[in-house]
Image (spheres, rainbow, N blue to C red):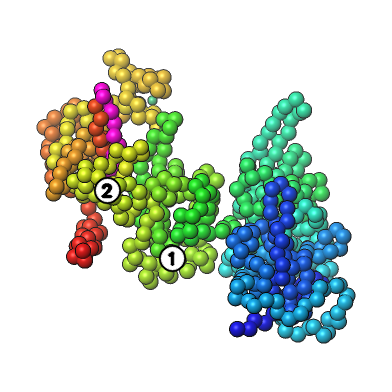
């Protein structure tokens, strides 16, 4: 098989002439120290006629070099690049996006007999043909105003080459964020502010000060920018989150990764020379820059990695309230995400995001900056800094939607969350019969085990099922009746004129093989009894027969239980405590499907 290199492309690139998707051969690749422990890769590329050694990989492409996809002799197509002129006049081509179209081992060696390119050496006329060459927009063309900057409207996250219009009030060229570096001072970026901080102030022996920071995004990448004192006064009120601006002349330095998860080795400080001008025509600048990782690849990522994911919301659990380590109650909601890899992972959302999330219609979810944890195998969790986008207007979302509606919906998928535990389990729910729970000693390990079962209530204890709890929001501590009309909460260290009822039920549930005592708190207890705690509390004091009736009626109802099992020790006696995490009515269609699968499996044995 032959590959055709884009002869003449090296010369064009060196002259700053834009070449559309040139095909070049990598002749040599070298790792260089980018400072502060960072690596950069420098490439010598050949177009078959000439070689040039001043190609750099933008750092987001480093994995291609680290995993040896890019190696000597491989043939690449440069999808996006930018030519920078250094202070000494040398040119560096920064590769922003490329594909390896022939790997090194598919190639016999070097194509042709290229010679090092020396500027001014060759006659452009001779080499002008095969590479489609397109000149950059005139460098010092018209007195470009905002009005002349109309760019074709892109759907979003476009892959168009960066246009290079002139900027308002300045002569510097609009460059991609990914190409910014400390060695160039004259530049302008056109970027969307995706996050703007509040103003923070400090005061110490050397004086006081203030600062704010913002996150900037364009098609090529993202960067954090910080302004201090004068720049806070000058720019803070001008900047609106979500809007697009031309930003010229800032100071670039190595990013402090401790404070930022942005994918850029550098960060920007606004200085006295910095100008920021609003850009009106901005719909082609992406809203948020994402680097989506397929769910199937999350298994090999490190724990606590911050990742971007796009997936179908296959299943949405109800919102629950849980206690944090410091005894605060927060809302949480688990959803199951599936993508075209057929893998499923659980995402946990918190707080108001969890409360307001609507999973009906199985929307596409894009999450920027979720944390990967090894809880229950692999799972994801949103952070304060995460951005969650529902049905975002991006090609990836449409592709997923099409796939899911056509074939994905019929797939069961394979879950990465909660696959561990004795017996391995299958699917994210770890279905068990109550006999299996005992035979497999669930809950005897160091960590709690979670399982799901379908079981029927055979008895619920009425005694002590309700308690009087602190009425303040997020506090469910039991109150002490002061016998003077006031109720005291030790945790809040306060007395209240009222309290709220909370449920803590002890129930015996059974399936065809065994039974199990379980503890249910508020939400699951209300589901089992079909009444809310406040009403039950009232009945208990006013109408005991009606109260008893509710408990009678709750018997012999069947639910899907999600349970947590853990060995607990009281007075030297250890026993398994099973707590209901969630109780739901049986979805008979789902249940039947699972039974059929199990019957088939058994028949095949
Ligand atoms: Zn309290």
Can you give x and y, in whole percent of width and height, for residue 14 in the image? 80, 71
Q: Residues within 10 Å of mark 1 (few under 14, many from 20)?
A: some
Label 1 SS: loop
Say whether residue 87 is visible.
yes
Label 2 SS: strand
- For disc 2, the marked residue is 452
Number of numbered discs on residues: 2
Q: 572 left or right of 6?
A: left
Q: Residues within 10 Å of mark 2 (few under 14, many from 20)?
A: many
Residue name at image x 35 percent, y 26 percent = 477
Can you give x and y, in whole percent of width and height, for residue 160 in the image? 65, 70
- For disc 1, the marked residue is 340
Residue 141 among those drawn in magenta: no
Q: 217 left or right of 429?
A: right
Can you give x and y, in whole percent of width and height, for residue 202 in the image? 69, 31
Where, by quadrant of the figure, is residue 12 drawn?
bottom right
Front residue of 237/428: it is 428
Can you give x and y, in whole percent of width and height, for residue 127 in the image? 80, 83
Considering the whole magenta stretch, tell me its main secondary structure: strand
Mark 2 or 1, nearer chain start: 1
Say whether residue 286 is visible.
no
Segment colored magenta: 560-572
433 in relation to 403, above or below: above
Quarter that holds the C terminus = bottom left
Where, by quadrant of the figure, is residue 314 drawn?
bottom left
Q: How far is the residue under mark 2 from the one under mark 1?
A: 26 Å
Front residue of 330/486: it is 330
Residue 567 among those drawn in magenta: yes
Quadrant containing ligand 1:
top left
Front residue of 84/384: it is 84
463 in relation to 163, above or below: above
């Amino acid at each position: 098989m032959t590959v055709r290199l884009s002869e003449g492309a090296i010369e064009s690139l060196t002259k700053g002439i834009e070449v559309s998707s040139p095909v070049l051969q990598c002749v040599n690749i070298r790792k260089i120290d980018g400072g502060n422990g960072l690596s950069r890769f420098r490439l010598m590329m050949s177009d078959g006629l000439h070689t040039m050694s001043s190609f750099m990989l933008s750092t987001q492409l480093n994995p291609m070099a680290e995993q040896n996809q890019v190696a000597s002799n491989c043939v690449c197509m440069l999808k996006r690049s930018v030519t920078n002129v250094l202070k000494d006049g040398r040119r560096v081509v920064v590769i922003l996006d490329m594909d390896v179209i022939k790997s090194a081992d598919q190639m016999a060696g070097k194509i042709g007999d290229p010679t090092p390119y020396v500027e001014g050496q060759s006659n452009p006329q001779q080499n002008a043909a095969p590479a489609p060459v397109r000149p950059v927009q005139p460098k010092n063309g018209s007195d470009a105003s905002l009005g002349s900057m109309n760019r074709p409207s892109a759907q979003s996250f476009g892959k168009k080459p960066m246009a290079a219009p002139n900027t308002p009030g300045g002569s510097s060229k609009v460059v991609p964020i990914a190409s910014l570096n400390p060695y160039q001072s004259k530049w302008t970026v056109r970027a969307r502010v995706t996050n703007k901080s509040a103003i923070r102030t400090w005061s110490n022996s050397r004086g006081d000060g203030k600062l704010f920071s913002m996150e900037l995004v364009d098609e090529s990448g993202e960067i954090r920018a910080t302004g201090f004192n004068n720049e806070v006064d000058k720019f803070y009120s001008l900047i609106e989150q979500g809007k697009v601006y031309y930003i010229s002349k800032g100071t670039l330095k190595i990013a402090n990764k401790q404070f930022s998860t942005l994918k850029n080795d550098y960060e920007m400080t606004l200085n006295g020379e910095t100008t920021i001008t609003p850009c009106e025509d901005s719909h082609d600048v992406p809203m948020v820059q994402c680097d989506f990782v397929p769910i199937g690849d999350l298994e090999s990522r490190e724990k606590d990695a911050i990742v971007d994911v796009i997936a179908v919301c296959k299943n949405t659990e109800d919102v629950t309230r849980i206690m944090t380590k410091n005894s605060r109650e927060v809302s949480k909601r688990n959803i199951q995400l599936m993508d075209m890899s057929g893998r499923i992972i659980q995402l946990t959302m918190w707080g108001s995001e969890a409360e307001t999330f609507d999973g009906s219609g199985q929307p596409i979810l894009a999450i920027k900056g979720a944390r990967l944890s090894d809880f229950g195998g692999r799972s994801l969790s949103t952070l304060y800094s995460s951005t969650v986008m529902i049905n975002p207007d991006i090609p990836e979302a449409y592709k997923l939607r099409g796939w899911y509606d056509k074939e994905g919906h019929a797939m069961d998928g394979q879950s990465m969350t909660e696959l561990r535990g004795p017996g391995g389990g299958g699917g994210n729910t770890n279905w068990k019969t109550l006999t299996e729970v005992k035979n497999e000693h669930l809950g005897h390990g160091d960590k709690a085990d979670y399982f799901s079962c379908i079981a029927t209530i055979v008895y619920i204890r009425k005694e002590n099922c309700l308690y009087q709890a602190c009425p303040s929001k997020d506090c469910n501590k039991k109150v002490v009746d002061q016998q003077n009309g006031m109720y005291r909460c030790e945790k809040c260290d306060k007395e209240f004129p009222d309290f709220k009822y909370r449920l803590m039920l002890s129930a015996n549930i059974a399936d065809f093989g065994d039974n199990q005592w379980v503890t249910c708190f508020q939400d699951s207890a209300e589901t089992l009894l079909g009444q809310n705690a406040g009403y039950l509390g009232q009945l208990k004091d006013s109408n005991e027969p009606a109260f008893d009736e509710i408990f009678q009626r709750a018997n012999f109802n069947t639910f899907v239980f999600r349970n947590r099992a853990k060995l607990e020790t009281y007075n030297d006696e250890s026993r398994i405590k099973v707590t209901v995490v969630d109780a739901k009515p049986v979805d008979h269609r789902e249940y039947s499907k699972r039974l059929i699968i199990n019957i088939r499996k058994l028949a095949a044995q």
